[in-house]
Structures are given as C-alpha cells and as structure tokens.
Amino acid sequence: MKSFKITTLPGDGIGPEVMNAALAVLDVVGNEYDLNFKIITELAGGASFDQYNEPITESALQSCLESDAVLLGAVGGPKWENLPQEKKPEKGLLKLREVLGLFSNLRPAKIFASLANASSLKKDVIVGSDVMVIRELTGGIYFGEPRGHNEQEGFNTLRYKKYEVERIAKVAFEFARKRNGHVTSVDKANVLDSSQFWRDVVHEVHQDYQDVPLSDMYVDNAAMQLVRDPKQFDVILTQNLFGDILSDITAMITGSMGMLPSASIGENHAMYEPVHGTAPEIAGQNKANPIAMIGSIAMMLEITLNQPEAAHRLNDAIETVLENGIRTIDIASSDSMIVTTDGMRDEIIRAFQQTNKAISNSRELVKE
Ligand code: NAD
C-alpha cells in the first residue's frame, strides 16, 4: 500500500464544506486503489487569524513543507477585510506559495458538454475544447525591481532569468507529453526584449522534447484566438502577467467559474485548490458546489501522486453526474435535479464506484 501525507487547509467561508466533500471522495479513491492518505488539517486565512492572530502559522507551513501535497479550500471574507495588510487572509496564501516555491500555476479549462449552454460563446465553438494554461507564478513584472510610482510616473520591471523560463517550460512540455498534446508559447516577442528572451529559452528547452509540437503566438492574437476557436489550443505556456489574463478568459469560456480546479507546482512541492473564492453569502448552508475542489483532488492524483487512472475515473464520474442532470444551485437549469454539497459528493462517489464496477465486470468477462 502506498502512503501519502496530505496537509489540508480548508480556510474560510465555503472552504471547509467543499474540503469535507472532497476528502470523502479521496477516502473512497484510496480504498479502491489501495492508497493510504495521512490527512493533517491546519488553519489558514481568516480562520487562522481568529485563532492565532496570523493568517498562517509556522507550524502550518512546516506541515505543508513535510507533505506530499497540500489541499487548500479558499481564504478571505468580509470579516477580515479591514485587517492590516500583513494580517489579511490573502497574505497567508502568498506566504504559502513563497515558502513552497510554487513557480507554476496550472489551470485547466475543460468544457463539460452538458454545461455548454452556460458559456457566453456558441456551443459549437466551445464543445470539445480542453485547454491547460500554465502560468509562470513567481517572476516577471509582478515581482521585478525596480518598481514604484510618484506623482509624475509609475513603473515596473519585467525581467526573467534563464532558469525561471527553463523550469516552467519543462513543466509545460512534460504535461503536454503526458497527454499527447502540444504547447503554444504565448509572448510579445515582436515588442518586448524579455519576450524574445522567453521565446529563445523555450525553444532551447524544446530540444529535449522534440516529440511535443511547439508553436509561438503573440499574446494579443492568443486572446483573440481563445474566444474565436479555443479547440486549437492544448497547453498554453506563458509568463505571469499574460497568464493571469488568459487564464481568466479560458475560465469564462467554460461559463462556470465554480467548476474549475487548479494546481500550483514547484520543484519539490505542490498545492491544489479550486479557482473560486470563499462565497461568504452561501457559506454554512450546504449549497456550495464541491466540483472544483473534487477536480483539484483529481489533479493531485494525476500530477503529484502519479495515479492517472484514478484521476481519469474521478473526472469521468464528475462528467457522468453532470450528464445525468444533477446540479448544485449555482449551475442549475430548469430541467436539472438540484442537490446540496453533500448530495453532489454522494452522487460523484456513486458514479465513481459504478465506473469501477463496470470496468471490473468487463475484466471478469474478458477472463471468462
Ligand atoms: P467567489 O469565487 O467567492 O464568489 C463569486 C460568485 O461565485 C459568488 O456568487 C459565489 O456565491 C459563487 N461561487 C463561488 N464558488 C462557488 C461554489 N463552489 N459553489 C457555488 N457558488 C460559488 O469570489 P468573490 O465573491 O469575489 O470573493 C469572496 C471572497 O473570497 C473574498 O474575500 C475574496 O478575497 C476571496 N477569494 C479567495 C480566493 C482564494 O482563496 N484562492 C480566490 C478568490 C476569492
């Protein structure tokens, strides 16, 4: 039996509810695949501030550092909005990313055919699209020095070191290779020196990944192409600022922000979390949609825990439930069956177990 240590940070608002649902699913996956999960729960965000006067404690960080993977719900809410900067819930998140060295952010935007009507784009434009945006997370213009503003000017510095581009390019090529896909590296090399540098380094790294097709695209064109024909993309590799914008465009193509998982990966650590926030207005009501958190578990199984079959079955289970018209209130339409957070959890578990049964039944038939 393989064992993994997972630190969970449920956080605030709906965070603990979606985390509980996801952990129940993980338990079932563990039983099915003979995986042992040692789950450590720590506080983060407002919940940590209330208890310890800090948005994340040293001991929580230590537990994350010692884990195979970290699962985060979401942090923040009106209760903590007026705290000084260094005590704000978001500070806990930033600290966590820094300490774990999470330099890449992976945001998949897959269209569930049964939810295609939720998108503002035409159904035939989006159905079948499955894009992964891989965004550099710890460098570029958000962190470059010097930076500043006064009454006369404002300025930031866009600078990338070679190792920063190399390591994120590797993540993109590895990921694309695993799913037999291709990489589109997005830059602005016609105008920016830093982008020409980015392009040169990406092509250098590509020498080791000749089996993965690579193309380059200017960011303005990429934004346009994403809404014109998202199916042309597979893995999009890009710098921090462009990735921030493009990943929100891809998220909106799906039409359902509450469905989207994400992963942040470093050299030695990884954290998985839904893209959505703490939805304070529905917190504690058993109404939150747990799919983004459960999808984050699927990403963890695939990327960090190297359990692709379990991950695919879990994603299939989510898709089956949606195809059966089962919805939490945020994605409901007139003909759907509305369930609670716990109800969605149970439906996904049932669908997962049925897939397993179907597969083991077919194995039995083959044996006969
Ligand atoms: P939000 O994502 O919490 O909510 C936006 C809308 O989507 C709301 O109508 C909400 O009810 C709905 N929603 C979001 N997730 C849902 C789910 N799983 N099920 C059902 N409905 C869902 O964004 P917001 O309102 O801008 O932010 C609320 C708080 O969350 C703020 O304090 C913000 O700072 C924080 N936040 C945290 C993170 C994070 O921890 N990574 C990310 C975004 C926002």
Image (cartoon, grey):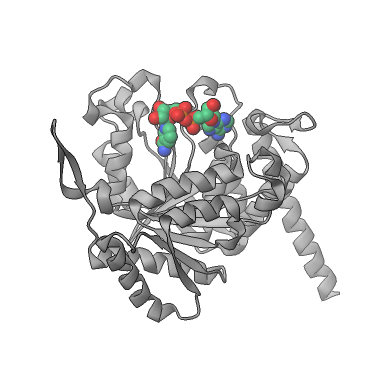
Q: Is residue 185 visible?
A: yes
Q: Nearer the viewer, residue 14 or 35?
A: 14
Q: Position of residue 68 (x, y in %)?
A: 40, 56
Report the residue at 22% width, 24% height from top. 84
Report the residue at 25% width, 30% height from top. 54
Give residue 191's quadrant in the image. bottom left
Residue 205 position (above or below residue 97): below
Q: Is residue 11 visible?
A: no
Report the residue at 58% width, 62% height from top. 232
Report the residue at 67% width, 36% height from top. 344
Q: Quadrant of the C terminus?
A: bottom right
Q: Position of residue 235 (x, y in %)?
A: 50, 62
Q: Position of residue 53 (x, y in %)?
A: 25, 25
Residue 172 appears left or right of 295: left
Q: Position of residue 56 (x, y in %)?
A: 29, 35
Q: Nearer the viewer, residue 144 or 353?
A: 144
Give residue 360's quadrant in the image. bottom right
Residue 146 appears left or right of 214: left
